[in-house]
Image (cartoon, rainbow, N blue to C red):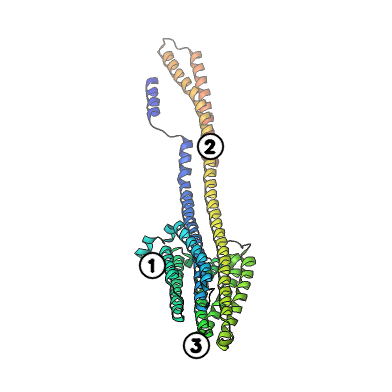
Amino acid sequence: MSHSTQNAASGASNRATTSVSTKILLIVSIFSLPIGVLAYLLAANYTPQIETARVEISGNAFQRPLMRVVSELMKNKTLIDTCDGQDCEKLRSERRTATRAAFDEAAKQGTDHAAELKIGDDDLAQKHLADLSVHSLQKQWQALDTDGAVATAAERGAVSSRYGNLIGQVRQLAGYVGNTSTLILDPDLDSYYVVDVTLLAMPEVTARIERTSGLASSLVNGGGAPVDRAALENESKLLDQDLARIAASNQTSFDADADSHGTSPTLVSSLRPALGRYQSAMNNYRRTLDDSLKEPSVVNASALASATNQANSASLEYWNVAAGELDQLLQARIGDFQTSRAEALGASGFVVLLAAFVAFALGRSITRPLQSLVQNLGPGATLLASSVERIAETSQSAIPDPEIAAIICEELNAHADNMRSAVMELARHVEGSGANRVTPQLAGASKE
């Protein structure tokens, strides 16, 4: 009998088993898996939004030198339209240096952001826009600056027209970058209406300044036709609408700022004064246009050039302030998303760690009583085997000794009591309050 018991025990020990603590940890791990998946999905949702905002910042960075190029080209065009004297070549040389610097900066930014903005030569060529690359535009300007003779009114008109076409191409590149950088799809109201100013309204205003300046110059120089007067009146009205749109977009951005990713500390304090300075310069330019319409003979060509250049400079200054505030809003969005992503991952990690700790504590609360039960039953099992052998020896003796039999019975009864106590303790841990159904049965067996 002892041999069969040992074989059974040996067979049970040879079977692969898993501890209770390990099973509890596995259960907790399985139920924690959805938390991990949810954390991953949250992080995956925030990451592309962060990357989109970063690409928008890159688009904004590239548009800065583009707007500077537009401003310099417009000053060149204004110089061609209005200058008629010995100082023209000297002024053109000064403008040449500033324009070259603007193109060089645009080329540098284009190289830095070529991949993410898709403005490399190959990218533009695939979209049949190879003539919009910065290098191509710069070569066009260099050829225009070198070959553009301005000795006669006809030559000035031809060179001015070529400058106008080049300015239009630069604005087209800026619009293309607005699409590839997703600036045009900005999701927040405060930044969207700043984008509306920098990407849509301001380039349109610069186009109006270019057209109205050329028309006013024709009238002031005495070569304007009635159609030029009508066109200038129409463009001036459209310019007023563009300026009203810029003011409205600014106010909408101010009103929506607090509802996005926190109130920007500089949006209102920086942009509103810049808008005021810009409006003041544009109002002066509008008065000059009105004077050119009413009494073109009394408007000095140099005064028109000065008002136009001031409007261009004020436009560039205001654009730079607006672009800087747009960067601040985009950085705030990135910071907010990064914080939310970190909080989501941190909370998920904390929940998983808490679950693991609870599983460990529960496992310990279960395994400790079981270990105690093993310790109690182990010696009893040995005693039981010994008692069985002694009973077998006594039963085979010629004269059984009652005292020995009584001692063996007492030992077995004591072992049975220990086993009942251990089982009752195990029942309390396994059944909890339901152990009351098991305990009376064990107690009754003890009395019997």
- Mark 3 to mark 1: distance in Å? 33 Å
Q: Amino acid at mark 2?
A: His
Residue 230, disc: 3
Foreground residue, 206 or 144? Answer: 144
| Residue 73 in picture, x, y percent from top left | 49, 70
Q: Find disc 1 in the rendering and name its residue.
A: 131
**Mark 2 vs mark 3: in front:** 3
**Label 3 SS:** helix
User: From what the image shows, is residue 218 above or below residue 371?
Assistant: below
- Inter-mark Cα distance, 2 to 3: 97 Å
Identified by mark 3, the residue type is Ala
- Earlier in the chain: of badge 2 and badge 1, it is 1
Which badge, 3 or 1, comes first in the chain's sequence? Answer: 1
Residue position for label 2: 429
Nearer to us in this view, 418 or 157: 157
Looking at the rendered structure, the kind of residue marked 1 is Asp
What whole-number distance in Å separates the C-alpha atoms at marks 2 and 1? Answer: 82 Å
Residue at 46% in and 72% down: 167
| SS category of the residue bearing label 2 | helix
* Residue 293 visible in rendering: yes
Mark 2 or mark 1, which is nearer to you?
1
Look at 50% across and 76% down and name the residue there: 210
- The x, y position of residue 348, in whole percent, is 52, 49
